[in-house]
Every structure is written in structure tokens, then in C-alpha cells.
Image (tube, grey):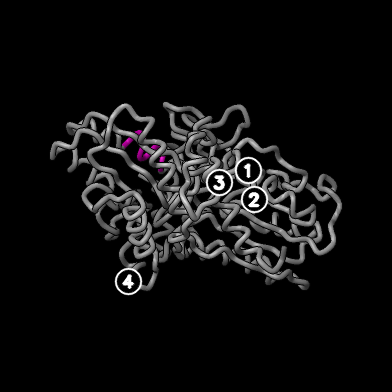
């Protein structure tokens, strides 16, 4: 089960056990040139990091370059990750995440008792074991943090021709590096205009809105505030749809089998949140419709499902795990799953889907299963992020 109720656009983290950590930055080279119009040719994912990218940790000002005049900050934000693969760090991360009222809206006394008395003690130990299986031991950090840093470094390299006044940084909504620390750093570097880029394609209050909450909380404490822009949801953006389609096509070409069915699996959400007005479900539906049109597939060939249920509330249907089981029982032998709602591979994609769902599929009669890597910091992924950034930076650069 996922640690991220009710939704995680980028999720926690992971690197697929069978592929190793390198999979997060090894999208097919052919895919970077396969992106059809209106997407521009993909930039190489192997660009060097320029001096304008900010440090990964939360350094003191003395470690940072001197301020620029009228700087423009670009802050990439993903969900978050524990600082270590042990129960203490995982518990600290989960507590911060699961006490956010945007994530768990019914967080009264009973919820707090259950959280502290049952959920945190049990899930912290279990999830710590999962993190150890996928931990980036070379950098002593989660793969999700490795990917996010790389996305920022590569975006900084792409934007380097704009000059040193454009400064790219990255942050996590939960754990570190914190949004507040990186905003403070950007402002200390001379940025009086800042673009915040939550990497959640489909809007949800539990993802995009909580990033905005944290940004605004920081700004409320500032006497001199920078001009601010927030990247809107990009669930129907042509570059995003094109990148997803090209990435899937490249992956299918590399497989030794042809899928009978493809699932587009999105993080789940309690139905109550949608009833209250959250547009997340409609955004997922629209992304899937556009993907079908791009790939010329019908609803039976490319199905929409929702993963990562948590608790006893009624969640969006159909559930990915139930669909995977039913397809196998009904004779489907070859299944491919992509996760369009995640900007980077994570525990939900590489553990829940690539390991747990694959195991269920084969247990109930399936033969071949493949999880398509997320866009990550691939050439296709970075073209998409570049286009999104440049669109929002119009008038500033």
C-alpha cells in the first residue's frame, strides 16, 4: 500500500529493483527524437550542470554564489522523501505528510490517535525496509531526491543561455530541502521574481494546493516579497501528452512482447474530495483521452485506473490492483502499465506497480508485465519541463 493518501503526483521514491538506480535517467535515446509535433526536438539528457543550479542541501549563504541584480528564480517542487532509510526518518517524514490537512482532511483527535498509535509505528518500520531495497547508496539518499536534483541541474543547463540572473533550485514539500529554505536562498541571491513549478500534471488540493500553501506561508513572513508565478496543472499540455506517448512507444518497441492491454494508472483519491470540488479525476480522464487519441487506442486497449488506496474511505474507481487481478483471471497474458501522474519514478511506481502489481498479475495467470518508466530527467522529460518553464517565464526573460 502507498504511503501517500490521497494523492501524490510525484510520489515518494524508488528505483526499480530489476533495473537499478540508472533507470531513472535512462529513457531510450530514440525516445528523445520520437516526440512528434508540436514538441520540439528533445535536448540531450547528458547536459552538464551550470553554475546557476542551486545546491542540493540547505547550505549556508557563504557556500552560495554572490547575488545577482533582478534575478529570476525557478523552483522545482516534488512531494518529498525521508532523509534516511530507517524507521526514525521514515516516521518523521510520514508524520509531516499525514498531518497536513490538505492530505488528510478528517484529521481530528481520533485520526491523530490512530496515526500515532498504529499507522506510524507499523508503517515506518515496513516502509523503511522498502526504502532500503531501493536506496541510492552511492549518494546516501532516496532515488527520488536524486532524480529531482538532476531535473533541476538539467533545467539550469538548458536555461543557461538566458544568463546568470536565472537561477534554478529544487525543493520538497515534505522533509528537505524545504520550500521555505530554498525560497529564502533564491531571494538572498537577488531573485525578485520567482516561478514555482509543482511537478504535478493533474491538479489536486493534496498536491499542488499544499505546495502553494507552503509558499504563501513563507511569503507571509517576508516584508519584501518577490513577484510570484505558480505553474498551473499541465494535464492537457501538448508537450506533456507528446512526451508520454513517445516514451510509451519507445518502451513498447524495446519489449519482447506485445501488450494485450495498457493501463494508465494514477494515484488514487477519496471520492469525497472530488465531490467537494477537486478537479483531479476529470484531469486524469482528460489526460487519458488525449493519450488514446495520440496513440490511436480505444478504451479497451488503454484503460484508466487508480492506485495507492489508503484507509477505509471510498476511493476513485477502478482500482489498479483489482483491475490487474481481473485482467489476469480473464485471460490477459501481456500487460503494460504507465503512470502519467508521476513526474518521477517513486515507491508507488517502482515498488507498488513494478513489483507488487506484477506479482499479482502473474499469480492470477498473467505471463508478461512491464512498468513504463516515468519521464524523470530523460530527454523527453526535460524538453517538457523546459517548455513549461519558458511558457511561464514569458515577459520575465
The majority secondary structure of the magenta stretch comes to helix
In terms of sequence position, does the residue under pointer 4 or pointer 1 come before the other? 1
Q: Which residue was labeled with disc 2?
A: 170
| Residue depth check, mark 4 versus mark 2: number of the one nearer the observer | 2
Q: Residue at x 57, y 63 (%)?
A: 231
Residue marked by disc 3: 41
Which of 274 and 150 lies nearest the eye of the viewer?
Answer: 150
- Mark 1 or mark 3, whichever is nearer to me: 3
Q: Which segment is the magenta one?
A: 349-356
Q: Decide: marks 1, 3 in contact (CB < 8 A)?
A: no
Secondary structure of the residue carrying tag 4 is helix
Q: Quadrant of residue 147?
A: top right
Task: Say whether disc 4 or disc 3 marks the residue closer to the N-terminus.
Answer: 3
Cβ–Cβ below 8 Å for labels 4 and 1? no
**On-image quarter of the C terminus:** bottom right
- In the rendering, which numbered label is found on residue 275? 4
Cα gap from disc 4 to disc 3, whole angstroms:
40 Å
Judged from this view, the residue extending furthest toward the left is 330
Specify few, some or many for label 1: CA neighbours under 10 Å numbering under 14, 14-19, or 20 or more.
many
Amino acid at each position: 500500500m502507498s504511503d501517500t493518501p490521497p494523492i501524490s503526483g510525484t510520489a515518494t521514491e524508488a528505483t526499480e529493483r530489476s533495473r537499478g538506480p540508472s533507470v531513472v535517467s535512462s529513457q531510450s535515446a530514440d525516445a528523445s527524437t520520437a516526440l512528434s509535433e508540436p514538441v520540439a526536438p528533445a535536448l540531450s539528457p547528458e547536459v552538464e550542470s551550470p553554475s546557476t543550479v542551486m545546491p542540493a542541501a540547505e547550505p549556508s549563504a557563504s557556500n552560495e554564489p554572490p547575488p545577482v541584480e533582478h534575478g529570476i528564480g525557478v523552483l522545482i517542487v516534488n512531494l518529498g522523501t525521508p532523509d534516511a532509510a530507517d524507521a526514525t526518518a521514515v516516521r518523521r517524514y510520514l508524520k509531516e505528510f499525514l498531518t497536513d490537512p490538505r492530505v488528510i482532511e478528517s484529521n481530528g483527535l481520533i485520526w491523530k490517535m490512530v496515526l500515532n498509535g498504529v499507522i506510524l509505528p507499523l508503517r515506518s518500520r515496513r516502509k523503511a525496509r522498502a526504502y532500503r531495497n531501493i536506496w541510492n547508496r552511492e549518494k546516501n539518499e532516496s532515488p527520488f531526491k536524486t532524480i529531482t536534483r538532476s531535473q533541476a541541474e538539467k533545467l539550469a543547463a538548458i536555461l543557461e543561455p538566458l544568463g546568470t540572473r536565472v537561477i534554478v533550485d529544487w525543493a520538497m514539500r515534505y522533509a528537505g530541502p524545504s520550500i521555505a529554505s530554498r525560497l529564502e536562498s533564491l531571494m538572498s541571491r537577488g531573485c525578485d521574481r520567482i516561478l514555482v513549478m509543482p511537478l504535478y500534471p493533474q491538479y489536486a488540493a493534496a498536491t499542488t494546493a499544499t505546495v502553494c500553501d507552503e509558499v504563501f506561508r513563507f511569503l507571509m513572513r517576508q516584508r519584501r516579497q518577490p513577484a510570484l508565478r505558480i505553474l498551473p496543472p499541465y494535464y492537457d499540455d501538448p508537450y506533456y501528452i507528446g512526451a508520454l506517448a513517445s516514451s510509451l512507444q519507445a518502451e513498447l518497441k524495446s519489449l519482447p512482447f506485445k501488450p494485450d492491454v495498457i493501463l494508465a494508472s494514477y494515484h488514487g483519491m477519496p471520492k469525497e474530495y472530488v465531490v467537494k470540488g477537486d478537479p483531479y479525476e476529470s484531469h486524469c480522464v482528460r489526460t487519458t483521452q488525449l493519450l488514446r487519441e495520440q496513440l490511436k487506442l480505444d478504451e479497451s486497449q488503454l484503460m484508466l485506473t487508480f492506485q495507492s488506496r489508503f484507509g477505509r474511505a471510498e476511493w476513485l474507481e477502478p482500482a489498479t490492483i483489482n483491475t490487474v487481478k481481473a485482467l489476469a483471471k480473464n485471460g490477459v497474458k501481456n500487460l503494460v502499465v504507465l503512470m502519467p501522474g508521476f513526474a518521477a519514478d517513486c515507491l508507488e511506481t517502482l515498488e507498488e506497480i513494478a513489483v507488487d502489481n506484477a506479482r499479482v498479475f502473474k499469480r492470477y495467470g498473467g505471463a508478461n508485465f512491464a512498468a513504463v518508466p516515468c519521464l524523470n530527467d530523460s530527454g523527453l522529460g526535460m524538453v517538457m519541463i523546459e517548455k513549461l518553464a519558458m511558457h511561464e517565464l514569458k515577459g520575465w526573460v
